[in-house]
Image (cartoon, rainbow, N blue to C red):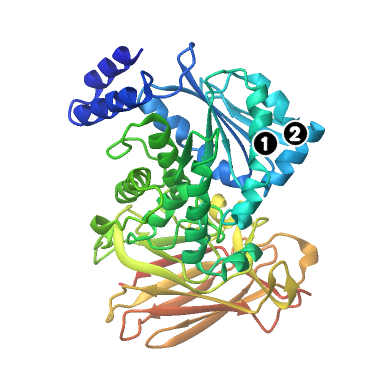
Amino acid sequence: MLIKMTFRLLLRRPVPTLQIVLSILLTVFLSGGSAFARNADDIVKVLAIGNSFSEDAIENNLFDLAREKGIKMVVGNLYIGGAPLTLHVKNTRENNSVYAYRKTSVDGTRSATPRVSIERALADEDWDYISFQQASPLSGQLTTVTESLPELLDYVKARSRNPDVKFVYHQTWAYSAHSPHAGFANYEKSQEKMYQAIVNVSKEVAKMDGIDRVIPAGTAIQNARTSFIGDNFDRDGYHLRMPLGRYVAACTWFEKLFGIPVTGMKYKPEGVSEKEKSVAQSAAHFAVENPYTVTGLTRFQKAPKGVRHPEAILVDFGGTLHAGPWNPVTSPLEGKTYVLNDSLGRTTRVHLEMTARFNGKTGGGTAASQTPYALPGNVTASAYFGNAKKAVGGGAITESGFRLTGLRRKGQYDIVLFASKMGDSLGVQDTRVVCRGKNEQQGSLNATDNISGLIVFSGAQPAADGTLTFTVTAGPANTNPDGFYYLSALRLKTKK
């Protein structure tokens, strides 16, 4: 089997082949004959007993990375949102059928089966790898792991169909520096302290009987944060950004499981640029090499310079994947920055910085706008929102804001903003935006049932430092009891 795989690599990619083959042969030598766990049916089968962090790590991209190398895979995830190890132990003791069993079959078909027990999922396949992880708020607290993991490991080992199964511990990542997660207080709201605590736990777990390897996804994300992309790999302060953050984690899993360097691989998900792909692959590769130490990505400190005279720049607030030429702002939190592309897909010198957070993301916007700017439904259907009158979710967010940097100081720009929330009973959801640069303009629209209303700033001139600053809040005509205001989309164009 190994010889056949080696010949496949020789035929496919002659340039990096020697490095890959030597890596495989070295792994074989050290492990006594097997480059990685693989069933007799020539399929690698991976099951995670986890939560949304295992969803972020393995449900996307891992299967596609393996496919590029001709490796057949089955990927399973036993999912309960936020589940700690104590809950998994409880579910084994009571044989509770409470998991969403998400599975990618060898042909790439995805399925999701509700109300599945751990026992049932273990019986479904002769898994090669089974992974465990702690819930993110507890991931840097050793006793919460050592009190539960041994019992869970014994249960799973006794019921595994594969006598050669390998057990994996998934090292999760520290929160964003601006994370609103209540569990961040466990680490004094310090990303560095949280990361170090997670590393310390991972080191101890790696010494436990029965744990064969640790997947250093947390170190990979921390490595990636040293690049020009910065602390922008999450979508809400703790879950990974789609697609880029998830791609980093999947690259880490791939290289750690298979011993094949991920650097230089061709596969990347839609919405990840070539530069971002290199950052993600390098972050993962160095994490596998140094799983408990941050490796600064010195090659990727400087952002792409970008074109000086871009076409229209289109911004999707609350976006996840790129919708054609639209730049997704993937997190509502302050401190996040985004390098913007123009409508031709070229990197520009314009960056968007979130200066004051929105409360979060909401759907329910129009799916068919009737503006002169052909705003697509997958942009207008969602928005970021604030709530100026009373607390909702995380609190009362009375004012939100962002800044555009890298603009031409002597340039003039036409700016269009759109917001929409459908629902006749919502009252007047007056949304006011103030744009400040060399001059100041302000405008408002009623987001309720809006399909065509716009805020238009004509001839906006940047400040002396090349910035335009925007404040978004509820306008004086807002009658919504929560004071909801919204922002869905922005279009910026150099004024001719």
Picture coordinates of residue 419 (x, y %)? 59, 65
Identify the residue shown where x is 47% and y is 30%: 63
Residue 465, image x, y percentages: 31, 83
- The disc placed on residue 61 is none
Q: Which residue is mark 2?
A: 92
Left or right, residue 424 beside residue 252: right
The residue under the point 72% across, 24% down is 120
Asked if 321 appears above or below 76 in the picture, the reply is below
Give 166 or 228, whichever is nearer the viewer: 166
Name the foreground residue: 159 vs 175: 159
Residue highlighted by disc 1:
152
For residue 478, what is the image quadrant? bottom right
Split into 4 quadrants, where in the image is the C terminus?
A: bottom left
Question: As displayed, is residue 473 above or below residue 123?
Answer: below
Residue kind at label 2, given as amino acid type: Thr
- Please state which of residues 426 and 360 is positioned toward the viewer in this rendering: 360
Q: Given contact means CB atoms under 8 Å apart, are the residues at marks 1 and 2 in contact?
A: yes
Q: Quadrant of residue 463?
A: bottom left
